[in-house]
Each structure stands twice: as C-alpha cells, then as structure tokens.
Amino acid sequence: MSNLIQLKEGVASIVKNEWTLVSLPESQAEQRVQAGKVVLFKLTGENTVTDEQIATTAIPAAGKVIVPLSVFIARKNELALRIASQEIGVWLDTHEVLEHLVENQPNLNALPIIAIHVERFADGRIFSLGTLLRTRYGYKNELRAFGDVLRDQLFFLKRSGFTSFQIRADRSAQDALASLNDFSAPYQGAVDEPRPVFQRYNRTV
Amino acid sequence: MYKYDAIDQQIVDERVAQYRDQTRRFLAGELTDDEFRPLRLQNGLYIQRYAPMLRIAVPYGMLSSRQLRKLGDISKKYDKGYGHFSTRQNLQLNWPKLEDSPDILAELATVEMHAIQTSGNCIRNITTDQFAGIAPDEVIDPRAMAEILRQWSTFHPEFALLPRKFKIAVSGTKEDRAVIQGHDIGLEFYIDKAGKTAIKVWVGGGMGRTPILGSVIREHLEWQHALTYCEAIVRVYNLHGRRDNMYKARIKILVKALGINEFRKQVEAEWAHLKDSPNTITEAELTRVSRHFEAMPYVTLPAHDASFDVTVASNTAFAAWVKRCVHPHKITGYRAVTLSLKPHGKAPGDATSEQMHVVADLAEKYSFGELRVSHEQNLILADVKLSDLFPLWEKARANGLATPNIGLLTDIICCPGGDFCSLANAKSIPIAQAIQMQFDNLDYLHDIGDIELNISGCMNACGHHHVGHIGILGVDKDSEEWYQVSIGGKQGNDASLGSVIGPSFAAEEMPGVIQKLIDVYIKERTPEERFIDTVRRLGVAPFKAHVYAKEEVAA
C-alpha cells in the first residue's frame, strides 16, 4: 500500500510512487549538518559529502529516479540525456542551500520533481525552502516532502507549496488526508493562496 | 477592542476541532510524547511539575468583561479557582487536566479566545503597552497593528516550526512601556518627518540565558510593509538560526554571531523580493481594524471633580491608592486605574475566580466593559471617570485589589517558579512573599518610592529579572535553591541589563539582602533620585560592600 499523498488541482489522493529515491552510500567522514560555530552560519549548506560518496552512489540505469543534490551537481553530464527525458529529479536536505541547485540548474522547470528531506518533523526550514522554490525561483512541478513527514505538518507543507507528501511508513496516509484541510480560510497569504484574508474577502466591521 | 467576524470565529473553531483530534490521537497512543509535544505547546499546554499548565492568549493584553467572566468560570470549573496573569499579558491555569484541555479551548472559543501559539517554537502573543489608546504621551495607538500582526502570525505556514520561540512587541509612545528592546522583534511606531506613520524596527533582543538588548535593524519603515519586513527577518532566522542547541537558538544569537550589519544585509536582500507582495497591508485593512479601537464614547468632563478632591484630602488610604494606582488619561476628567494583583503575602499576578468576576463587574460599571493585563502582572481599567474613582476603590479594596503599591518595591514581577514550573531551578513565589512581608509598611514603601523588583526561578527569565532595578534569579547549586541578585537593570527607552552583585544567597537571607540594598539607597540618595538613579550614579560597589559586609568581618 502506497503512503504517498499527491495534490492535483487541489484534490488530494493516495497514489502510487513512480519515483525511486537514490541515497548516498554511508560515509566514514563525520557529517556536519549544521555549522559548529555560530560565525559559520552561512556555511550550513557546506559540502558535507565526500567525492567518494558521490562517485559510488548507485543510480539505477533506467526509470525515474530522484538523486541527491550533490550527486546531481557532480554527475550532471552523465545524467544529461535522462534529465532531458524527464527521468531525473533532485532531493535536498533541509540544511542545503537552494542557490547551489539554481546555479547548476537555472531552468528548474526542466526537473519534473524536487523533493526535500526532513530528518525531524520539527525542522521548519522545509517550509521556507518550499516557499522559496515556488516564489523566488518559479518552480512549478511536483514538490515533495519525505522523511519524518507526519499529518500534523501537512497543512503547513501544503501552504508552503508542497504538492506531494511521503507519509512516514509507520503512519497511515489515509488518516493523514484529513489534516490537509485543517483550516478553511487562513489569515495570511502564502504559496497556495498568495492573497491574505483582507485581499480575498470584504471584511467590514 | 477587536471583535471577531465569521472568519476569525471559524479559525478558532477549526483549531478546537484540530486540537481535540490531536489530543484524542495522543491519548489513544497514535502520537508519541515527542510528536504531541509541539502540537500541545502551540496550544499553550505544558506538562508541569504536578499537572499540565494551560496558557491562554490575551492578545496584546486586551480583555472584555465577558471574556474575564469566562476565564473566572473556567478557573473554577477546570482548575482550583484561580489563575495567574503572566509577563506576556496572558493567563495561565496551573491545574487543568490534559483530557479537559479541548473542552477548555471550546469554551474559550465561545468568547472569541484561544490558546494559539502561546508556547512552542513559533511566533507568540504580540504584546504592547497596557495604556495603549489612552496614554497622554501616545503618538500612535499600536493596537490595530498588533491585531494585524496577530492575524498574520496565526498559523503562518512558513514559520510554524522555528528554531525557537519568537516574541514581537509593538509600541507607539515616546516612553516605551512594552520592553521593545527585550524582544526578538520590537516595532516602535512614530510619525516621520512627512507626517506619516513609520516604524523603527528593533531585532535580536531577549531575556533568557543570554540577555541581550535589541539592535536597530531599520530606522524607518513605512507601516504598509510591517508584515513583509517581519517575514524577511523571520525567514533569515528560520533558515539560519541554530537548531542544534536550544540554548543558542534564539534570533539574538544569530544576530550577535553575524553582527547586526551582516544580518541587516541578509534581511534587506530578502525583503527586496518580499516588498509589495500581497501581504503588504492596505489602507482599507488598517482602517477596518482601527475601527475596532476607536475612542470610547467619552463624555465631556471638567478637569476637576469636587467630590474627588474632597475625598483625596480627607481619606489618606484613598489618597495613597490614587497616588500609586491611578494614572493620567489623554481625555480630560478620565483616569486609568491599576488593580494590584500584588497584595502582600500572595503569589504575584494571581487572581481568584471571584476576583475575576469582581473586576469584570467593575469594568462593566466604570470602564466601558473592557480591561487590560499589564506585563507587570496587574489589571488595568483604562477609562474611569474621576468621580467614579472612590466607589471603584471601595469595591476593589473590599476584594483585595487595591493595594497601593504599583511601581513600589512590593509590586514584584514574578514567574510561577519552582512551585509549579518544571523548568525552574528554584521557587520564586515564596521569595516574593517574604520580601513583601519584610516591607509590609506602606509609609516606608512610599518613602522608598519607584523601584522594580523582578524574580525569575530560572535563567529562562519569565520574571524579566535582567531588567529589574533589583533582579533575583533562582539558581541550582548541588540541588539546593540559591538566589543570585543583580541591580541596575531597567526597562524602557534607556533600558539596561542588571549587574550581578556577587555570590548567591539562601532563600531565608533574601529579605535581609533586599533590606540592605534599600538601606544603601536611603543613605546615599539625593532628593530626586529613584533607586535606579542612585545605582547608575554610584555603581554596584557600595551596594555590594554593604550586603556582604558581615561575611567579610566574619572571615
């Protein structure tokens, strides 16, 4: 049973996952997901992946695959044909920097899917990343959340521009559907509805 | 005050339904403790030492009589018949049951109230000056903008899970009474040279473990851009604030690490994209919300009231109360009144269910049915006629609400401390009570004059001890409760952080320590000086010398 929720023109349903997720092989090197010193804040997206990891990442030879950002950047030439035939998507961790993706792939809409991995559900960076992809970088295709994705964050993810949600395996995607519509008329403008409430309704006293 | 329309009501109703289902799933074992924690916190529910604590939002401190009666009823029905008003102008219940919390929220929703985002790593209750709208020194009534900010921040999807809590204060007076510099964002409204409403934006202030006063990130922001500019600030923080160490996760740490100039550069770069986006506030929306805060239907009154003048002259107890608890009003013949929640020997900020009903009645009879909660943890009736002050006082006094100690030593700002709070290192309420009893002499208190004493039970600083003229911080030493004393802190435009005077004290020493600090002040003060002025003139040294004198002799 699939645990993937997809929004199509505002309607949510549970669909089959057509994409294979490619992960980096385990590394011996210590991972720095967050800069140790506060002065290095801008470096939170520093390259924490080794060249060896990138080189040894196993990408299935056929079919639709979502590859890590570091692999996508380093092995773009190798993937060029498959990118052209819409078989390649990219995924990022929440500490990675979108500029790195955009510098290497100015035309984001050539990618049929971008996915963001959230390691802990309480990591709200995913909302800003989704918002930026949609509003700053004009990305229009599928935007997926995966990892520690739980139903009580779905409403916020949807409003931040996400259109598919890989619910954590031990939870029911069927139950989670209801949470996409927790609130019917939110106050502030966001990705899914840019107009704040005072632009949408005539709210007289 | 702001009244809900169908949209506002729907949001709180849907919140009740959402939270009810979340609680059901938790109780059914479908959500783990870790998963439920941020959900309940964003509804104000803490799991405390003895019972959960529910923090109910009082947006920018405004309440109606009807709402206060409901709070009184809820305190009686679901708690032990009292509630605690906090330094964020909210109300905390110390003994509700987790199972009851959805029902409490449902009852609150019937009077246009909620507990949304009163805790958790999100944008919290917006706070402001308790005299907003009536203060003679007010330039701009900030409440309409506070309400617009409240709506914008409520379930803002991008900022639902920030690195840490985020507090915004707004102020529209020359004399800051909203601790603007002690907030993650402080918005100071003023009229610019062109005669238009503008905002001076402060960022990166905060109390807690690392107290820092805010820095100015923008001297001049047109009011229309308040929301988009805040979005730019919070976005930079959301993406780059630390998430690996909760003690270094507030925006103040990021601002300090980057430096205000680099932080400003990043925010301005972000804002360049957000400026004029749909969340820009329209003239129509400001007008709509402002209409809720229009002036009360005041009557034309003379500047003096003969019966009032006679009573003040003949009744010393009433005169003492007027001196401390009655405040100027911008409308002739009206005054604002502070009802003290600091009677000597009681927990500061606590009100019983009966008192809430009494205050609701007083507000209805004398103050257009509205009241405010101050961040000093007292209740304010903002629009009282001079001629009504005496009957109001009699009723308040009969109900323990007229201690004439506002702004005096026993008007102690105090967190719930170790009696209730599971974060606390030490109890704070018994210390407050002991100090109040040490100084339980009104003539003496009036002689000491204006002074602020703040107590926090731990470095999270809910009692704002860093900005107390005297600050007391509960610390843990080898599992014993000790108290560190600082002096020289101050809120307001000339805010400062207090300096620790030396090694900490045991609980029973505290009244004596405060007495010694006061003794030095009485001895050294010039006729015009308040305690804080003497401390600023002389520095910590003479106070320190006297407080620790005995130990030095013994050694």
Image (cartoon, grey):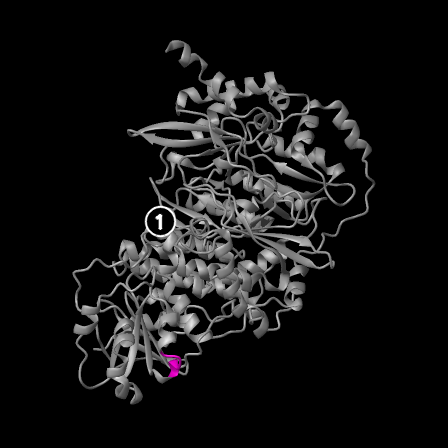
Residue A3 on image: x %, y %: 25, 74
Q: Where does label 1 land, which residue?
A: B246
Residue B420 on image: x %, y %: 38, 38
Quadrant hosting residue B135:
top right
Task: State which region is magenta.
Answer: A105-109
The residue lying at 47 percent from left, 37 percent from top is B463
Quadrant containing the C terminus of chain B is top left
The residue lying at 16 percent from left, 60 percent from top is A28
Q: Is residue A166 at all visible to an observer of this figure?
A: no
| In magenta segment, residue A108 | yes
Q: Specify few, some or many for label 1: CA neighbours under 10 Å numbering under 14, 14-19, or 20 or more.
A: few
| In magenta segment, residue B61 | no
Query: For this view, does B201 lie left or right of residue A43?
Result: right
Given residues B510 and B162, the one toward you in this image is B162
* SS majority, magenta: loop
Query: For this view, does B399 lie left or right of residue B553?
Result: right
Q: Secondary structure at mark 1?
A: helix
